[in-house]
Image (spheres, rainbow, N blue to C red):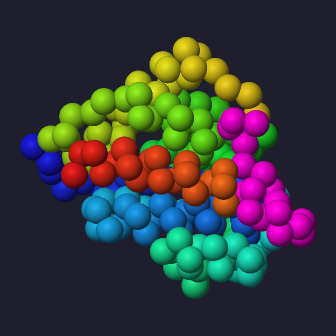
Amino acid sequence: MRTTTEPFRILTVCTGNICRSPMAERLLQSGLDQMAPGEFEVTSAGTGALVGSGIEPHVAGFVNIFGGNSEDFTSRQLTADILQGQDLVLALTRGHRSKIMELAPGLLRRTFTLRELARLLPLVDADPEAAAADRWKAAMSRALRLRSAHPAGPKEDDVVDPYRRSDDVYQQMVRELTPAVEELLAWERRYR
């Protein structure tokens, strides 16, 4: 039986916190809010954040096109304090995952790259009667066990950084990031 609990807290992490992690944040939050208003809280931060900046304009356009809201965003630097209390941390590259582990080694079991979790989560079954937070916590534990059975390289795990690069690289970022976000949303949709 589902019960009301604290929101399940997800943090997305990239470098500048103006392209990849805000896009993942806003698309995840929008999709999860459509299914389960108030049950998830998605935020983001950067390992080398352009603190105080908004979402990069190209990326803001993509966020809006894909149904997210690019307004009222302010980039922030990743800190150990921000990592405290997160239920799931989604790094946009393996390098970001390493930085997260340096700041908060205790989050190892709750930290994946976005594309890694998107690859593993469809292999995980969950209790449809469980509250969302409980379902996701159990799923992360199962996904972690699958990590070594389904290894991948950086090309499968990382989302390219488009900042100040060509339109082709922005398009590549979209092709890498949006299907991964959709996999996570599709998994949650299975239990609704």
Residue 159 is inside the magenta segment: yes
Q: Residue extending furthest bottom?
A: 71
In the displayed structure, 11 sits above or below 120; it is below
Q: For residue 46, which quarter of the picture?
A: bottom right
Using residue 57 as the reference point, say whether residue 42 is left or right of it.
left
In the displayed structure, 101 sits above or below 49; it is above
Image quarter where the N terminus lies is top left
- Horizontal and vertical percent for residue 18? 73, 69
Question: Looking at this view, is 118 or 102 the one in front?
Answer: 118
Using residue 128 as the reference point, say whether residue 94 is left or right of it.
right
Using residue 135 as the reference point, say whether residue 122 is left or right of it.
right
- Horizontal and vertical percent for residue 173? 72, 57
Residue 136 is inside the magenta segment: no
In the displayed structure, 103 sits above or below 57; it is above
Q: Residue extending furthest top?
A: 149
Report the residue at 41% width, 53% height from top. 185
Badge count: 0
Residues shaded magenta:
155-173
Q: Can I make out residue 164 in this image? A: yes
Q: Can I make out residue 141 in this image? A: no
Report the residue at 69% width, 35% height from top. 156
Q: Residue extending furthest right?
A: 165
Report the residue at 55% width, 15% height from top. 149
Question: Looking at this view, is 149 or 5 the one in front?
Answer: 149
Report the residue at 56% width, 79% height from top. 64
Using residue 34 as the reference point, say whether residue 114 is left or right of it.
right
- Horizontal and vertical percent for residue 167? 83, 69
